Amino acid sequence: MSLFSLDDIKKTHQVKGPSAINIVGSTRYVIGKQHQTIEELMPELPATGDAIEFVSNGDWSVHDLLFFALDKTGPANVYFTTWAISEFAIRQLYTFVYSGMITNLTGIFDFRNVTHKSAELKFLQRISPNIRPARIHAKVTVIENDQWAITIAGSGNYTRNPRIEIGTIRNSKESVNFHKSWIHGELNSRSSFSIY
């Protein structure tokens, strides 16, 4: 006997108390198998108000998920935070910015990357002036345009990682605004670092 059913999760829930939160919509739960592509695991992005919680098997990375989502949303503003970022991911971001699929790129990466990847990160900052190092371990990606408000949050960095990762993809303007707000706050704070 289970404690709850998936039908219970799909219903609207309200948490009572001083910090009440309304959760509307449904959540799908997907577990990736070895060599399963993103398209096979979740062929569509969640509808407005819905979410997908996923477990990957290390066959694709967060930046792969970003590019998959952009293929569905069309050109969009992108915000990202990551503890680590690879040269491959940086070059892909460059390609998407200059193709027009990323209309505005804003990001934060952990300051420790500055030591090991200074040339790559300077290149990334030339792509967009809205990218800074900071003390960060959070991993979130926001994709926003007139039709879509997607947030991807989870354990994965912008690197290739042949390990199990987890995450949530949410289609919610409120979630997008929440993450954009703290990212802008960090970008404008004095705790950000300069790599020049």
Image: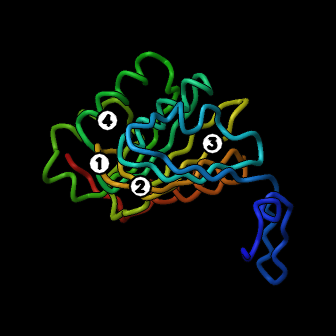
Q: Looking at the image, how many numbered discs can be counted on the residues? A: 4
Spatial CA span between label 2 and label 4: 17 Å
Q: Between disc 3 and disc 2, whose residue precedes? A: 3
Of 38 and 135, the residue lying toward us: 38
Q: Earlier in the sequence, mark 1 or mark 3?
A: 3
**Residue 155, x across and y down, in percent:** 42, 58
Mark nearer the N terminus (3 vs 4) = 4
> Which residue bears the numbered disc 3?
150
Amino acid type at mark 3: Ile
Distance between the Cα atoms at labels 3 and 2? Answer: 19 Å
- The residue indicated by pointer 4 is 89
Q: Residue furthest front?
A: 1
Dot 2 alpha-carbon crowd within 10 angstroms: few under 14, some 14 to 19, many 20 or more: many
Q: Which residue is drawn at 40% across and 49% down?
A: 57
93 displayed left or right of 104 = left
**Amino acid identity at mark 1:** Asn
Which of labels 1 and 3 is toward the front? 1
Q: Which circle, 3 or 2, is nearer the viewer?
A: 2
Kindly identify which numbered label has been placed on residue 165.
Answer: 2
- CB under 8 Å between discs 2 and 1: yes
Secondary element under disc 2, as helix, strand or loop, is strand
The label number, if any, that marks residue 111 in the structure image: none
Marks 1 and 4, how far apart in space? 12 Å
- Asked whether the residues under the numbered discs 1 and 3 touch, taking CB atoms below 8 Å apart as contact, a structural biologist would say no
Question: Residue 72: x and y, percent?
Answer: 61, 26
The residue that label 1 is drawn on is 161
Work out whether 145 lies above or below 55. above
The alpha-carbon separation of the residues under discs 3 and 4 comes to 19 Å
Picture layout, residue 64 above or below residue 190: above
